[in-house]
Amino acid sequence: MPSINFYFQVHQPYRIKKYSFFDIGTGSSYFGETGENDLNNERIMKKVARKSYLPTNNILLKLLEKHPEFCFSFSFSGIAIEQMERYSPETLDSFRKLIDTGRVEVLAETYYHSLAFLYSKEEFRRQVEMNKKKIKDVFGVTPKIFRCTELAYSNEIAKEAEKMGFKGILGEGVDHLLGWRSPNFLYKAKEANINLFLKNYRLSDDIAFRFSERSWKEHPLTAEKFAKWVSEVNGSGELVNLFMDYETFGEHQWEETGIFEFLKVLPEKIFNCHPDNSFTTLTDCTKKYPVRDEVDVPYITSWADLERDLSAWVGNEMQRDALAKLYAMEKDVLATEDTYLIDIWRKFQTSDQVYYMSTKGMGDGEVHNYFNPYKSPYEAFISFMNALNDFKMMIEDKKILQNKKKNNRRKVRATNRSNKK
């Protein structure tokens, strides 16, 4: 004891290109597909694969071969898998090799990495089922644990996950909600019969955010030092949940920082530091450890920023206006029964689209600026709304066409009835 749960989030959005007012009505593509620019999805996927996914997958495969006790978990957005299929199939194959070992668990999430749970429970469920199917089709496994977009969690989200048949759900170990309790135990969601895994954000963020921070008093972070911190949980915890973006390795923390060398030796250092240290998958934890308490989370938390809330996505009027207008289109979009149009609408839902509009400042803002391919949150908002207005025109044209077809069919039926008489 403790059991270390490494969980990695794999996601890449379809970024909306710089869409001007003069593009409205042209019906041109919304998502960056061509040109050497910061919004080109193919270029970005290939870069992230080269710098992060492929080298990290190679390291993890060797670790699995070297340490029979080593294991970890992934979740994939459906649109990340789509882009790997299209732009980097060798990367998808490298993920398959890991999962085929039987020691890598795959979690479920929303297919489009969306915030649908805030606006449409039906759309939320549809996207989760889409993601489960994609995981089964691509990797041959069925997820048993759920991870909501941006590690969003609340009592209500836990209830939805239970209804969909999941045995566990991930959340942030928010101090003021835990009180005297530690995130290093297995908990139960309030009013739902589902296991709750809470992120140890201090240890997770030591790797994900502070690893290369030279002003940090613990810099440089060595595998020996981190293994010691993990081992100190012995006697005061049963789990150490280390949740982070997979791009931590090689993209957020560049190879030059030593992040790959750190990862290569970390399991061995953890095993050697204490005889009771182990690695587990999340599902195995539900079988190995008892639930220690129930945690009440009446409002949505996330893994972002100091507030651990959704303010990075819905904190300003631009973001709220964009999302409200987007989800107001649900009925009309679905009524088209056009898979191409429905797919576009769902790509607009990806949480990154409104994350780029964040105006949060100070320390939090530095994080948002790093991930923002636009020059400003206002440029992101303008591009989004211009593209959405163009898309709305497409939906209205589709409705007009559908109504004309319906009217024509009515006229034909009426004529046929008249002729029979």
Image (cartoon, helix red, strand yellow):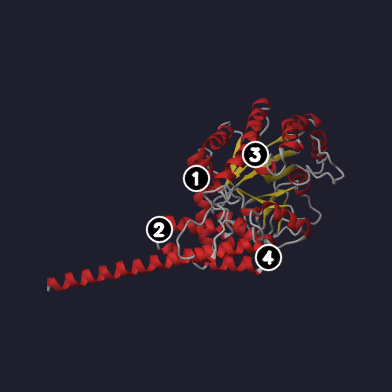
Q: Earlier in the sequence, mark 2 or mark 1?
A: 1
Residue density around tag 4, few if under 14, some if 14–19, many if 20 or more, within 10 Å: some
| Residue under pointer 4 | 315
Numbered disc in front, either 2 or 3: 3
Q: Earlier in the sequence, mark 2 or mark 3?
A: 3
Q: Quadrant of residue 375?
A: bottom right
Q: Earlier in the sequence, mark 4 or mark 1?
A: 1
Tell me the kind of residue under disc 2.
Asp
Disc assigned to residue 134? 1
Residue at x 67%, y 67% (from the top left corner): 316
Quarter of the image with the C terminus is bottom left
Residue density around tag 3, few if under 14, some if 14–19, many if 20 or more, within 10 Å: many
Tell me the kind of residue under disc 1.
Lys
Image coordinates of residue 86 in percent, x first then y, are 49, 42
Tell me the kind of residue under disc 4.
Gly
Q: Answer with left or right where residue 176 lies relative to residue 373.
A: right
Image coordinates of residue 400 in percent, x first then y, are 37, 69
Pick the front one: 373 or 2: 373
| Residue under pointer 2 | 338
Res. 281 visible in picture: yes
Q: Answer with left or right where residue 297 lies relative to residue 414.
A: right
Is disc 1 placed on a helix, strand or loop?
A: helix
Q: CA distance from mark 3 to mark 1?
A: 23 Å
Residue at x 81%, y 54% (from the top left corner): 180
Q: Earlier in the sequence, mark 3 or mark 4?
A: 3
